[in-house]
Image (cartoon, rainbow, N blue to C red):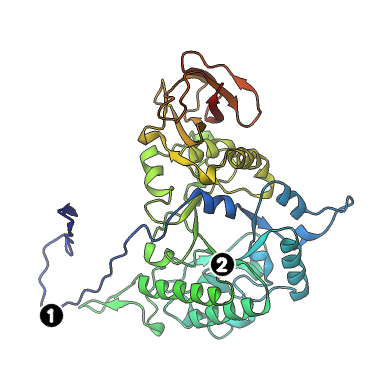
Amino acid sequence: MTSKANVILLKIKFLDHPEVITSPLTFRFGLQASPVKPVSFAWRSAARILHDIHYDSSKPGSNGLCELDALRDGGVKTVIIHDSWTRYFGQMIPADADAFRSLIGACHSRGLRLLVYVGYGIARTAPELQGKHDLWSTMQLIPWDPGYKPETRGFDATCPNGPWVDWLVAGAGRLFSEFDLDGLYFDGTSEAWRCSNQSHGCGWKDAQGNLHPVYPMLAARHLMRRLADTVHHYKPEAILDAHMSSNLTLPTLSFCDSLWNGEQFETHTAAERFQIPLHVFRTEFMGYAHGMDMEFLCYENRPFTFAEAIALACVHGIEVRPYPKSLQYVTPLWRAMDAFGVAKAKWQPYWSRSGVTCDTEQAKASAWTRDGKALVVVSHLQRTNATVRLRIDPHRLGIKSRAIQATDALTGVSILVTSNSVSLPFDGISYRFLEFGKR
């Protein structure tokens, strides 16, 4: 693709090898402009999503407080209940309607929004699927057989070209008409899984009669649009959050508000000293080019510790979505960002003259600037201990005075600034949040 004088020239290669064409061919394709919507730190600070609460999260303990109280106090504003909200995987009705209403009420009374899980299939044993499995499923089957409760959670992927779509959309409509929910969390729902199931129109045959699969992208797009229209009919401000693993298919994701990406690395471990090249992270995990808020997914030590994941993500302006057990790492960051006013600040990333440079390529520094102050996140991105020297550009950071004071934004401890430079020790992959301002 080239651009000249506001004219875009797009060249598409349809064949990468010689081919004899003996009959007419029809090509259908669409163009998806991006970014699909603006991305802002203001939206992120208003969303503050935490994953994996349960019905018991609203039950008070001996002190009269429940898990939701701790999450609220930790800065969470949106919570997601995973597939435990239904009896069978993939259903669109709660396992216990009264308990579900109680959970919604408990969330709302604490100022929390609640999203529920929607997958890409329905349990093989679910009543709704009996007699419909072969028509609804992808072929060849794409099975999921979990170790936990396989009798109610094991399923085969469904195809958006099949009747499952109408069932799912109708279920979403009933769900939002009966319960005061705040949005949906999609797990694989947006993906166009390969399918050759001719009973619902997938697959194609070559001249020799061999059946080949298709990837029903347009059908998946129609599904996501119908779900978005249905949900927003009942709750216009609802959040549609999509989890996918490196499947950035904008035609299907463009109806969502936020993305959660990173599970594709879970087979690696911290012991492997796994790394993500920074140019790869900037391309895939930031969300700016796509037009959706993005958060990084990291399981502990698969492939990073949670603190290592924060170091990688935060210097790119991206947050690592917490679970209840990992909220302790995120709460201090949220508080520092809110105290500074990140939602109204200017973002100056390390690749665009942030105003702070490091004396080693192993460390990067990005900044938010506002009202003559700067909040700087410094990340050391190698698994070796090091002392990093920062060089501060007061003009670039909007600090008019040459006399600068620095404070650790997470602890409040003063940091020595000498000749517009700061030295910081780092233990492996780690991060520091500093606030710079006038003396």
Secondary structure beneath dot 2 equals loop
Corner quadrant of residue 249? bottom left
Q: Nearer the viewer, mark 1 or mark 2?
A: 2
**Label drawn at residue 237:** 2
Q: Nearer the viewer, residue 141 or 35?
A: 35
Whole-percent x, y for residue 202 in the image: 36, 78
Q: Amino acid at mark 2?
A: Glu
Residue 107 position (above or below residue 325): below
- Left or right of 422, for residue 35: left
The amino acid type found where label 1 is placed reads Ser
In the rendered view of the protein, which quadrant contains the N terminus? bottom left
- The x, y position of residue 216, in whole percent, is 37, 72
Residue at point 60% right, 82% down? 128
Tell me the SS state at disc 1. loop
Name the foreground residue: 274 vs 390.
390
Q: Which residue carries the number 1 mark?
A: 23
Q: Position of residue 272 (x, y in %)?
A: 49, 35
In this view, 386 is above or below 431: above
Label 1 or label 2, whichever comes before in sequence order: 1
